[in-house]
Amino acid sequence: MRDFISRRIRCGRFYLDGGMGSTLISMGYSTNGAEKLNLSSPSAIKKIHDDYFAAGSDIVYTNTFGANRLKLPGENLRQIITAAVKTARLSAGDDRYVGYSCGPLGELLEPFGSMTFDEAYDCFREQAEIVANLDVDCVVLETITDLKELKAAILAFREHTNLPVWASMSFESNKRTYTGVSIGGFVLTAQGLGVDALGVNCGMGPDMMYENALELTKYASVSVFVKPNAGMPYFKDGKTFYDVDADLFAEQMSKIADLGISMLGGCCGTTAEYIKKTKEATEGKPYRIFGNITDAVCSASKVVPLSPTLVIGERINPTGKPRLKQALTDGDFDYLVSLAVEQTEAGAQILDVNVGMGGIDEKECLVKAVDAVQAVSELPLCVDTSRKTALEEALRHAVGVVIINSVNGEEQSMADVFPLAKKYGAYVIGLCLDGDGVPETAEKRLEIARRILDGAEKYGVERDKILIDALTMAVSVNDNNAAVTAETVRRLTEMGVKTVLGLSNVSFGLPNRNVINGEFLRQMIEMKLTAAIINPTLKPRADKYARKALAGQDKGCADYIANVGGIKAEETASKEVGVFDAVLKGLKGECGRLFKEKINKDNFMSVIDGDIIPALNELGRRYEEGKAFLPQLIAGAESAKVLLDEIKASYMTESSAAKAVMLIATVKGDVHDIGKNIVKAVLSNYGYKIIDLGKDVGFEKIKENIDKYKPSIVGLSALMTTTLDNMADIVKKIKAYDKNIVVAVGGAVVTQSFADSIGADVYSKDAQEAVRKLEAVFGR
Amino acid sequence: MNIDINEVKRYLRVKGGGYEGLDETIRRVADKASAELCPKSIINKFAVEWTEEGLRLKGTDIVFGGNLVRKTFDGCDEIYIFAATLTLESELFMKKQAALGAVEGIVSDCVLTTMIESCCDDIDGAIAAREAARGRSVTRRISCGYGDFPLECQKDILDILGAGKILGVKLNENNMMYPNKTVTALMGVKDMSFETVGGGEAMADKCSSCCSCCEFKR
């Protein structure tokens, strides 16, 4: 009778099987829908299993790699999977092991493709519910290249079965999968989610896989397995061959075994002979139990060790940011995404994501924000919410090992947060406050910190995964506030506890906040604060007045205000550019300052009519005369957009309706969307509400959005001659569907005569001409 | 990877020198792209034979039909098929750059187009050199969507190369490849005695066979 598999793999060498699909091909079967052979030719599948066991495998994987509803649409998955397990168990008997093989779904998840995390989870859940009641020893998730997909699979199988889960990804020679997942990101994430073993498989032969296996052993704290191909495939006389034979394979696997990796097998192109020879070459070699402890957070691609002093970008937080509030209310995540990228570029190492505000569904919004940020930034996240449901949903979607912001000293808070931290392998920020508020002394804050650390252990979360926030209170409110915070941090650090501060709050109510914030940051770096939640552009600096204020030696911060408050901030000292010039020259960076300094509730309309629109018109004129170029036109349009978005968020009401709603798309069969994006950027500044449907768009999607948005205009672009027929077809269908919609067309190969011939209403050769022609119809 | 700024400007439709700061922006994006992205490719050579339907890969049922194929590969008994991609990471790169600013977005699109074309030129040149050493010559490269070479052939090309599994390239229902910065191409091989234009054919010649209204035309 076999031992429990999770124990067995830690007690000696353990041999996996070799290729299934490539063996089926060599037997004359097709791998397209090969899982159906479990029903039609079980003896062929059993023979493959038997051969592997005869060669020395301790486990075989079921022939279920693609047994999901996307790869086998309309098939009875329960029948197929049940038959596959039955065949494998028949071959294995009671003494040997059967692993349920589960491969990728074959569709790309967002942001690469259109499949959502929840849809992927549901496909895996369907398999898990079937497998839960079958006689298998473990689930093996293999050949996956997207960490988000792997996470969906791990969660589905852990939530719907009691089986041990093994996870394996396919990496390239640059130690990344082709979606950019790093080995460290994979290992830390999978271990955080509680897998029992992890490995690398497919994509390359054992020689090239050595380096990837080595990298795996640097992070692993669970058993490790390696399953390479029989080298690289090549095509000859209509057949696929692999360039590494069984002897060479075994020789190269022997080197991998020398890393201490105990679980060895093969993937595409390998056969029973490869397993037999590998076993002969490695059986007597010593193996290791890996027990790495990596104190780090990660995203899919980046591992960030938690060593002092990390910068957690604070700017994705709607508090005090009307433009972000407006964007979140509108469901527009572009601005939030730009904040993520700006902070990444400015040197943040982790990004805090907080969308807590009234008037939105925080759970839905936080998940979208997490997805949007992770689509553009490789930084790990700090998920910032006080709502349990929003937190859990965000933790499911976030890829990597994240920090939860936050728990506090109250029992209910710990009962809500710590089980989630345990399940998703997250770090947690613990706030030194409870139902009685924020204690005024360091001693009392430490008491709460101890309560939080003990609470974490009670729920199975290691103390090392807690970062205590000593709480930053404004020195303008109480002279001693910063000193108490600093004392708390000092003592926590002495205790070996990780610390974090939302540091900018110290300067609330004071002028030139960067000066005192910079001094406080410098002091905290010296104290080995683990992480500071700040604007990443903030740099540590020394200032004697700030130092006095922070030490509680400047009553009411009077000296600081008198000596530092009068200095004009460096960033505004030397620049005197007006709104017109900022738009004309495309000085996007200036627009935020200009909005604050030059625009108010009384003059915003005159600024729009007197500066912003005239500057855009002037830029358009220069462009048409060949005196300005495309990137300049874009930069001007974007600068105008920054100002108009700020104005809209701060001063305009709901009744400030758009001139017209316009759908815009690059037509089906074409992915060249530069021209379409320029038209969008320019037109949106002239008061049109633009709904961008993207590229490669057919009539059905346009029709769906006509019904949804009731547009006055549909704009279509095409670059390739081969897609002009599609444009003609779409124009015809739009006109047949709603003859009142104005159809505007453009693109590199579109001409006025072509536009006329297909019944389009407006042709424009570029964005500026589009403005002029549409303004003639819709301008007011 | 060396990225030709003038090529990027051509895709940006900037004529002449451009304007102050443009070269710097392009160089900044190009340096980042070179540091972050690693082009990947897969190349395979196939024996071919002519049938009534067109050019067939021997040992398979894959046939490439149409006038462009017939004209380009006349006299060839082998063809190279390759796929090159800047990988899915290029999609994230463009998203990131576009989030930094619309100018960075459009510049990065043009930089990556230059990059993948340059990668194809390198493959093109390497194949030509290899065949020249064998005393054979190569044709210019053509891709699905050129002339009457149908986009529908894209699936066969990706499948025969195993590009889905090896490079992560996907094809949608309209035969558009993803990642967008992906190119597949065919190059014919024939004896030197056949009239040929040689490998690494001049850019101007590549443009000369295409439509006259293209604004990117050299």
Image: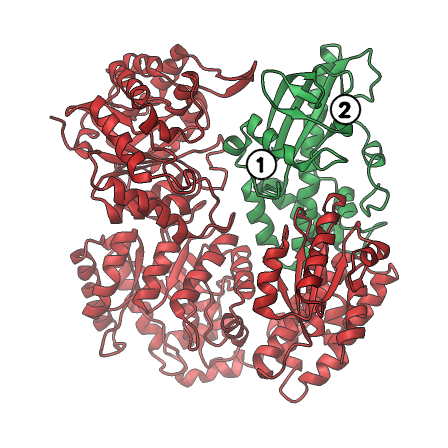
Chain colours: A red, B green
Q: Which mark, by number, is residue B208?
A: none
| Residue A28: percent from left, percent from top | 43, 17
Chain on which label 1 sits? B
Closer to the camera, A489 or A415? A415
Residue topped by disc 1? B38
Q: Secondary structure at mark 1?
A: loop
When asked about the image quadrant of residue A553, the answer is: bottom left
- x and y percent of residue A328 in the render? 50, 70
Kind of residue sitting beneath label 2:
Arg
Query: Which quadrant does the N terminus of chain B fall into?
Result: top right
Q: Residue at x 57, y 26 (%)?
A: B160
* Mark toward the viewer: 1 or 2: 2
Q: Is residue B50 above or below residue A300?
A: above
Count every numbered label the image shows and give the total: 2
Same subunit: marks 1 and 2? yes
Q: Report the Cα–Cα distance between label 1 and label 2.
A: 34 Å
Q: Dot 2 falls on which chain? A: B
Residue at (74%, 29%) from the top-left corner?
B66
Expressed as whole percent of the image width and height from the top left, the position of residue A448 reads 21, 69
Q: Left or right: where does residue B100 sit relative to residue A448?
A: right
Residue A570, percent from left and from top: 61, 71
| Mark number, residue B70 | 2
Residue drawn where x is 26% and y is 62% of the image: A417
